[in-house]
Image: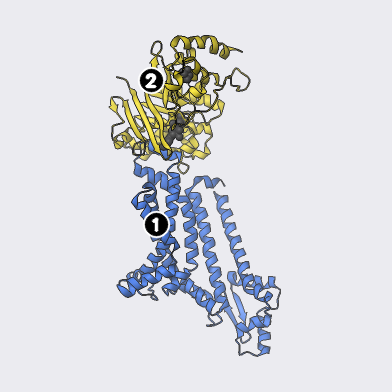
Chain colours: A yellow, B blue
Amino acid sequence: MTFLELKDLRIHFPTDDGLVKSVDGLSFSLERGKTLGIVGESGSGKSVTSLGILGLHKGGRARISGEIWLDGEELVSASAEHVRTLRGKKMAMIFQDPLSAMHPFYTVGAQIIEAYRIHHKVSKSVARKHAIEMLDRVGIPQPDRRVDSYPHEFSGGMRQRAMIAMALSCDPELLIADEPTTALDVTVQAQILDLMRDLQRDFNAALIIITHDLGVVAELSDDILVMYAGKAIEYGTSEDIFERPEHPYTWGLLGSMPRLDRERTERLMPIKGTPPSLINVPQGCAFHPRCTYGDRTGGKSTTEVPTLLESEGGHLVRCHLSGDVRRSIWENEIKPNLEAP
Amino acid sequence: MATYIIRRLIWAAVMLTIVSIITFAIFFLVPRLAGATPESLATRYVGRTATAEQVKIAAEKLGFNDPLVVQYGRFAKGIVAGADYDYGPGVEHCPAPCFGYSFLTRLPVWPDLLDRLPVTMSLAIGAAILWVLAGVATGVVSALRRGSFFDRAAMTIALGGVSLPIFFTGMVSLVIFSYGLGITAPGGSFTPFLDDPAAWAYSLILPWITLAFLYAAGYARLTRAGMLETMSEDYIRTARAKGLTERTVVLKHGLRAALTPILTIFGLDVGLLLGGAVLTESTYSLPGMGKYAIDAITNQDLPKVMGVVLFAAFFVVVANLIVDLLYAVVDPRVRLA
Ligand SMILES: Nc1ncnc2c1ncn2[C@@H]1O[C@H](COP(=O)(O)OP(=O)(O)O)[C@@H](O)[C@H]1O
Ligand code: SF4
Ligand SMILES: [Mg+2]
């Protein structure tokens, strides 16, 4: 049985301006001990997806359909109260900006202790000992002293470590990290990613890393799902995405990856234009206004919504171009450019 | 933290000094600019029946001919250390804090103020507890059920509450509950708490509610706005992601943060009221500081007015000080400052 499986998940928000289709038919699966990277520009529905898995849209104005199976339980139809008891314990989350994601008025220790005691009926002193252990585990020096510090007294990297300690305090089986390094310096980013990799191995959790930067998930992910306008447009193993990507949007993401071996963070071929509004998604392929290959599909790109189809060996792509054409474009037009010195 | 406290204390002392200078200037400098002579000022102290010679001597003895700085020094010293007054007939010692003697009754002002204080304190503190509980609770529920019937009804009433003057709501409440239904005390009565707690509460219940209603309305709106803001903060999402119950999320994480600015305003409001709830006290004829101030002004009893003004300023400054210190306790980020 698959540990986590999303089936045709849709999360729509009715607003005054119209229906925002933040997540629109998303399916993927993930096993314990494995890492899935979800990549896409800002506004593609990544955060809404992760909050949806945690059940945090329940009771709001969101319209949710589809299925979320976690360890044999379906969560979309489960009661809000039941999903609450799973939050923090069975599944936990790390947020982008640890400064705003931690309460400014409580010490770091108090916040970890609180997280632990929701799910464990232990005394404060036992929970405190556990909090100190967790802080030690995520590499915070002098944890028995730092446990009484406030979030604003930590550096950005230390704060994110504390946030990770908090998320891991109840030994969750699913950990979702939503842009865990976006708010951090480049050098600190690498340390946090290393830490997450080590911890995931120790905890044997299923890990979802969400990012707008393919570089972040390159070394960590087993699978990668590329998201655009609320939908998966390419989904495969890490090798599929990095060695033989087939979607024009993924090519764009690869081209716009900052590369350390280049002058500063010069970007090769940034994607033109901006992501579409999720209220008025373009007709046909949502990516067509920005795609340079749309004219090679005989007009289908602007009229027909492409479906996510298997290309080779479980590698899924949502594009009207035929597999042969895509592979030939990649080999002949894109790859040589990316590898050029 | 220690430097923060010391800095706040020094600031409070500076504020009080400034207030005393301004008060002094208003009562001594302004009349002089308006044409008052040392003699005309002294007349108020010795009475209109005194001869010109007596007035002249009194003016000299009271120091009205001295430079203003010297006069202010004497005035400030009186407050801190007490003063000796020499009207001519004899010297009277006025113990610290000396605000002088009433023109009318010839009695020192300070004991008068101490006498009035329990009334105003009972009124202000009782009302404050009521309004903070009612206002904050209403604001929280309104914010959580934004747009609901409760929210709209509460906010409409709150709008009425902040715009209705107290002498109006006070009169209406007196007419209905005291004179009409006879279930509350009519104006003018006050029983000290220690004499009879039940009678004390009975004499104050109507002023409490009227005053609390006025303030609760503002607090409800303030709390609602604050809660709407904090409940959309990232740390609220984190609190939910931990698996906390919604109740804990709202009270421990949301309200805790939303209360901080309310605390500031609460301190100032209580401080201001302790200096005299002028309108409430005159509406219900309660013998508090506010009523005292009104009477003093009506009678042009200068030392009384000055005493009450300084006393009120003292409360505001002290309330400010307490709020600043509490702020540091509540918001750890302030301790750095
Ligand atoms: N509660 C909400 N109500 C309405 N629209 C929302 C809500 N939450 C998110 N959205 C919209 O959903 C889209 C996807 O947002 P998000 O998942 O945060 O993107 P990202 O991929 O950058 O994490 C955005 O257009 C956002 O405006
Ligand atoms: S379907 Fe057409 S527009 Fe969309 S990505 Fe493929 S080629 Fe580009
Ligand atoms: Mg996001």
Q: Position of residue A10 (x, y in %)?
A: 36, 29
Q: Position of residue A37 (x, y in %)?
A: 44, 22
Q: Position of residue A175 (x, y in %)?
A: 40, 27
Q: Secondary structure at mark 1?
A: helix
The structure residue drawn at horizontal position 43% and vertical position 33%, both measured from the top left corner, is: A279
| Residue nearest the observer in this picture, A221 or A324 | A324
Q: Quadrant of residue B154?
A: bottom left
| Residue nearest the observer in this picture, B196 or B159 | B159
> Which circle marks residue B80 in the picture?
none
> Which circle marks residue B156 in the picture?
1
Q: Position of residue B1 (x, y in %)?
A: 54, 48
- Image quarter of the C terminus of chain A: top right
Q: Quadrant of residue B101?
A: bottom right
Inter-mark Cα distance, 2 to 1: 56 Å
Viewed as shown, does residue A33 lie left or right of A39?
A: left
Q: Chain of mark 2?
A: A
The kind of residue tagged 2 is: Gly
- Asked if one can make out residue A216 in the rendered structure from this viewpoint, the answer is no
Asked whether the residues under the numbered discs 2 and 1 touch, taking CB atoms below 8 Å apart as contact, a structural biologist would say no
- Asked if one can make out residue B210 in the rendered structure from this viewpoint, the answer is yes
